[in-house]
Amino acid sequence: MVFQTHKELSTKIESLKNENLKIGFVPTMGALHDGHISLMQEAMKSNDILVVSIFVNPTQFDNASDLSQYPRTVKNDTNLIYNHFGKANVMIYTPNVEDIYGNNAVAKSYKYDGLEQVMEGANRPGHFDGVGTILEFLFQKVRPDHAYFGEKDFQQLQIVKKLVEKLHSPVKIIGCPIKREPHGLA
Ligand code: PAF
């Protein structure tokens, strides 16, 4: 089932929680590829329900043209997920910016004990504040038991682990190995 608002999503999540079903969550910005599918496969193995979010998060872009040019292929993405996993135990959340941010799309500020100041974080100021803001929101609404991230984005994975530690969030973060194309592209 596809949910466009967090209100509808939360209502459904509440009933799944009441049934004690385990929720595996894969947050994405869409334009799905095999790497995402492999995260979803992992989620399906250890949970009763797969939740995938598809949302191009404006607050993690430090460049307006990157944001406007980011591919938005929600229809294809939704079909791809259903083709792989069927519809029965799959929930897809495709909010618009307003559903997440109201009329004020700004990031909160996070301290990740310095992790944000090195590597990619050093070149993209505010990027990981945007990532933290969207993930804090999504974890609150989806209430996953497990959330899956690629080890390809190594720094992001470390930061997400730090985020849930600081938020005292019960979600368990699972890092998954890099999936490579035959010619080596991650
Ligand atoms: O890795 C991504 O695609 C994004 O940073 C995430 C985790 C979906 C947050 O918008």
Image: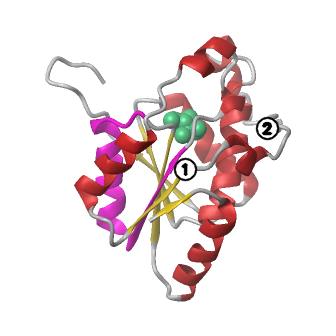
What residue is shown with label 1? 94
Where the N terminus falls, by quadrant?
bottom left
Q: Does residue 45 show up magenta in the picture? A: yes
Q: Is residue 157 visible?
A: no
Q: Is residue 130 left or right of residue 51?
A: right
The residue at 48%/30% (across/down) is 154
Q: Is residue 51 visible?
A: yes
Cα separation, mark 1 vs mark 2, equals: 25 Å
Please tell me how crowded label 1 is: few (under 14), some (14-19), or many (20+) other residues with Cα within 10 Å: many
Image location (x, y in percent) of residue 141: 66, 63
Please tell me how crowded label 2 is: few (under 14), some (14-19), or many (20+) other residues with Cα within 10 Å: some
The residue at 35%/53% (across/down) is 40
Q: Which of the 4 quarters of the picture holds residue 178?
A: top left
Image location (x, y in percent) of residue 166: 74, 51
> Which of the labelled discs sits on residue 177, or is there none?
none
Asked whether 42 or 32 is in front, the reply is 32
Q: Is residue 155 left or right of residue 58?
A: left
Image location (x, y in percent) of residue 52: 46, 54
What residue is shown with label 2? 110
Please say if 154 is above or below 100.
above
The residue at 59%/63% (across/down) is 142
Taking the image in four quarters, ligand 1 sits in the one at top right
Q: Range of the magenta residues?
A: 31-54
Q: Does residue 183 show up magenta in the picture? A: no
The residue at 66%/61% (across/down) is 6
Where the C terminus falls, by quadrant?
top left
Amino acid type indicated by mark 2: Tyr
